Amino acid sequence: MTATRKKGAGIKMPDCPIVFYLPQPTLPLSVYAAQTGQTERAVQLQASNQKIVLMKEQPGRERRVNMVYEFLAAYEEAQEAMNMKVK
């Protein structure tokens, strides 16, 4: 039996000298709910209402949250907040 190892995602932002590494570029909804402190049902509703970006669905598998998109959205929000604070 061989173990499969999922690769993480390395992200280099053009305006930042730091390379960010996401060990899990996607997470199942149940794991995402546990990590964010929400109920699984609340996360399912957010996903159904398209408040959370999901990966392309595969029949018979649990839906997965696109963590790269979540990171990029949070990074952009932080950059905007920093720009507003500087002005």
Image (cartoon, rainbow, N blue to C red):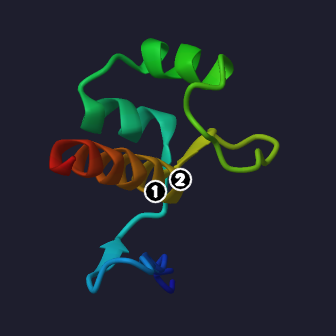
* Percent of width and height locating residue 84: 26, 42
Residue at position x 64%, y 42% in the image: 54
- Mark sitting on residue 27: none
Q: Are marks 2 and 1 in contact (CB under 8 Å)?
A: yes
Tell me the amino acid under the disc marked 2: Tyr
Residue at position x 32%, y 75% in the image: 20
Rendered position, 72 above or below 40: below
Check the image and name the residue furthest to the front: 87
Q: CA distance from mark 2 to mark 1?
A: 5 Å
Q: Secondary structure at mark 2?
A: helix
Q: Which residue is mark 1?
A: 72
User: Which of the two residues, 6 or 56, is positioned nearer the viewer here?
Assistant: 56
Residue at position x 47%, y 22% in the image: 43
User: Which of the two residues, 82 or 44, is positioned nearer the viewer here?
Assistant: 82
User: Which of the two residues, 19 or 47, is positioned nearer the viewer here?
Assistant: 19
Q: Secondary structure at mark 1?
A: helix
Q: Characterize the local packing of mark 1: few (<14), some (14-19) or many (20 or more) Cα atoms within 10 angstroms.
A: few
Rendered position, 52 above or below 69: above
* Percent of width and height locating residue 23: 35, 70
* Percent of width and height locating residue 40: 42, 20
Tell me the amino acid under the disc marked 1: Leu
Q: Which residue is mark 2?
A: 69
* Percent of width and height locating residue 34: 29, 32
Q: Characterize the local packing of mark 2: few (<14), some (14-19) or many (20 or more) Cα atoms within 10 angstroms.
A: some
Q: Is 37 on the left or on the right of 30, as rendered?
A: left
